[in-house]
Structures are given as C-alpha cells and as structure tokens.
Image (cartoon, rainbow, N blue to C red):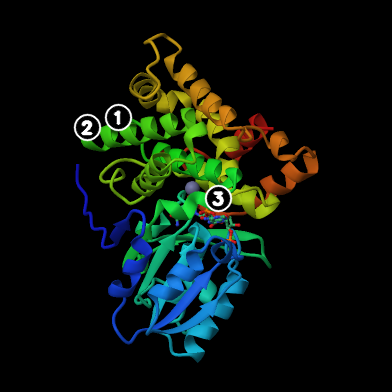
Amino acid sequence: MKFNYQNPTKLLFGQGQISEVRGQIPAGSRVLLAYGGGSIKANGVYDQVMSALQGFTVVEFSGIEPNPHFETLEKAVDLVKEHDLNFILAVGGGSVVDGCKFVAAAAHYDGDHWDIPSGKHRIQKAIPLASVLTLPATGSETNGNSVITRKSTGEKLAFGSPHVYPVFSVLDPDTMKTLPERQIKNGLVDAFVHVCEQYLTFPTGTLVQDGYAEALLRTLIQLGQTYSERDTDEWRANLMYAANQGLNGLISCGVPQDWATHQIGHELTACYGIDHAQTLSIIQPSLLRSQIELKREKLEQMGVTVFALPKTEDLAEKTIDAIEDFYQELAMPIRLSDAKITEQNDIDTLMQIIEGRDFLQAIGEHGKITPDVIKEIVYAAR
Ligand code: NZQ
Ligand code: ZN
C-alpha cells in the first residue's frame, strides 16, 4: 500500500453554520457569489449568505445550470476579471461547486479555457473558492474534481486539480429541507455509486479502506430503508455527511478504482440529458454483470458485509440483484427505457460518440472495458 493524502478543505458541519462564513473569508476580499437557478432564494439560504457577507464587496452570478455549461461559466470568468474579484463562494449543489472550480482556474489562464476540462492545460493557479452546499451527492465540496459540459459540442468532461479544493465548505443539513424528492434520491444513489467505484474492483488487503467503504455503503442503504424519515434532522445530517465522506479522497487511498460507470454515465447525460445519478442506476448493474468474473471476490465481500447475504455459489450475482433492488425501491430508473430512451437510433448515436472518445477506449480497473464492451453494457441496460 502506498499513497499521498492531503485534503485541505475545512468542513463546517451542522445547523446554523452558514453564519460562520464571515470569519472564514479573508477581510477585504472581493467575492463572487455564484449560484444556480434560484433555489437558494426560495429557501432562505441566499439571505443567510448575504447576511454573513456583510462588509465584503460582493458581485453575484446566478444561473449556473445542472451539469454546468462551459458557455455559462465563461460569463462568470468575465465578471471575475471585470470586477477584479479574488474569492469565489459557490452556493448550491455539485453543479454550482464544480462550475466555480472551473471559473477559479479559468480566471488565471490566458489560453482557451476549454483546455482545462479537456486536460490540455494543467492548472497552475486558481482563485480561492469555498462552498455552501445545499444538495448532498457529489462530494465536490471537499474534493478537487469538477465536471463541465460544453453544450455546443455535447461533451461532458471531468478535470481535477489540487488548486481547486474549496478552502472551506459549509454543510448545514437544514439547507436540504427544500430539496425535491428526485434530488434527494439522486444524491443517495450518486453517493452509493461513488463508494462502489472505489471499492468494487479486486481485493488488495486494504482493511481500513474496505471497512470504511462498507460502513458508508451500509449507512446509505439504511438511509434508503428509512427514507420515510427524510424530514428529520438526523436523517438529513447522516445523508449529508455520508455523501461527503464518499468522495473526499479517503477511501480511495492506495486502492484500485473503477470509474467506468461514471464515465459511461457522463456520456448518457451529455447525449440524452438524463440526471447524473439516474445514468448510474441504469448503467452500474449492467456493468457489474458484464464484469462479474473480474469483480467476483469484492462483490462476494460486499454481499456479506453490506447486504448480510448468505455465502452461496451465486453470492456475487445476488449482490448485484440487491444493488438493483436498492435502486428500484427508491424508484430510480434501472433501464434506459425507464428514462424513456427506447429508440434504436438513439442508442446507435450514443455508441458512435463513445467509439470516437479517446478516453473511453480502455476503461475499468483493468482497462478491459472497450467500446465493444460498453456497447454490450448499454444494450443489456435497454
Ligand atoms: O439551480 P438551483 O435552483 O439551485 O436548483 C438545483 C438544481 O436544479 C436543485 N437544488 C440544489 N439544492 C437545492 C435544490 N433545490 C431545492 N432545494 C435545495 N436545497 O437541484 C438541482 C440539481 O442540482 P445539481 O447541483 O446539478 O445536482 P448535483 O449536486 O447532483 O450535481 C450534479 C453535477 O455534479 C457532477 C455531475 O456530473 C453533475 O454535473 N459530479 C461532480 C462530481 C465531483 N465534483 O466530484 C462527482 C460526481 O460523480 C458528479 O459527476
Ligand atoms: Zn457521481
């Protein structure tokens, strides 16, 4: 086992913590306050943030959409430059936080800003950013990752850099009170799949990482089973912390990872506009069935430690069934047809796009998932 681990983001967790924002931003900062389509105005988060920002110069940028668009974010970069802003506060879900990571890096890069998501430019510097999270799902609030969509070309690309970790993030579970059920379920499932992507590969004797991943998976399943209690403080706090811990870099230390479900899922969102988490609940069971021999041991381990299944010959198969049942109980789509993608032409178009992507030629923890295998996975998920 060998790894370097550093997570520089300060976490301010709990009810009432938004007021602490004031003390975390350097005095005299000129702040870009960035948010999405207006949920923060409807639920009082905007007012709390504005009150905490009294005394700072604040310029607002609204309208960052789900699966944030490069085209929209470029306008925020212009605003940062025009007003000489030197701190970014993202208030919203993963899309706003991801979008602000892009803006923070792009404001310090004179070349073509698309070089950042496409990986042509290695980020050297970024404006310090922080977040007030209102939707637990992505873990973006304490990681250095971001996913940006370019509407004009239909690309959805991920980038990562140590320079775009938020300086601090506020996780106040009260902000979740206005979340529509669709977003709560999306968050639960996105977090579950994040842990799976860092766990369901092959055994490496990493007891701490496996044990923590299993605790998170059990927690998320328990939250699914107690979904009727979602309006309690305890339920909200547990989901917010579990989703955060699922993708903050801890459980991936020194272990093999498989982000193939996410990589294929991003193409489904770019092509059809399906919600991020819903692409995962559609693709993951099919991918696991396709890769079952390579993942059998970890699937069996998960079956016993997470789902308490008996040790039978078909334990790995039963574990995948249990994952799928978990999604179905949450009424998440598990087939493309559940998401209203039924036309053969649609799937052919998707496969053409995937075949043309350099970064999708050999994915999965063994690099064995080629476009032909992706095709089988997508077809089996019809
Ligand atoms: O825009 P507003 O009006 O704020 O509404 C949002 C949006 O419509 C709404 N919402 C957020 N908080 C709310 C709320 N509505 C009511 N009350 C609240 N408290 O929810 C909608 C979805 O928001 P979004 O930010 O898009 O959702 P999510 O947090 O699931 O983020 C998804 C994006 O993150 C990327 C995904 O690909 C996708 O683009 N990911 C980022 C990752 C990362 N940075 O590490 C990892 C993930 O795997 C993922 O790929
Ligand atoms: Zn995800």
Residue named by callout 1:
203
Q: Residue at x 56, y 73 (%)?
A: 73
N-terminal of the pair, mark 3 or mark 2, is 3
Q: Nearer the viewer, residue 177 or 356?
A: 177
- Asked if residue 119 is positioned above or below residue 317 in the image, the reply reads below
Amino acid residing under circle 1:
Pro
Disc nearest the viewer among 2 and 1: 2
N-terminal of the pair, mark 1 or mark 3, is 3
Cα separation, mark 1 vs mark 3, equals: 37 Å
On the image, the x and y values in percent for residue 324 come to 54, 27
Number of other residues with Cα within 10 Å of mark 1, as a class: few under 14, some 14 to 19, many 20 or more: some
Q: Is mark 3 within 8 Å of ligand 1?
A: yes
Q: Point out the image quarter for the N terminus.
A: top left
Residue named by callout 3:
179
User: Please, what secondary structure does the residue beneath circle 3 have?
Assistant: loop
Cα separation, mark 3 vs mark 2, equals: 36 Å
On the image, the x and y values in percent for residue 21 come to 34, 70
Amino acid residing under circle 2:
Leu
Number of other residues with Cα within 10 Å of mark 3, as a class: few under 14, some 14 to 19, many 20 or more: some
Residue named by callout 2:
207
On the image, the x and y values in percent for residue 172 come to 39, 55
Instruction: Say if residue 255 shows up in the picture.
Output: yes
Disc nearest the viewer among 1 and 3: 3
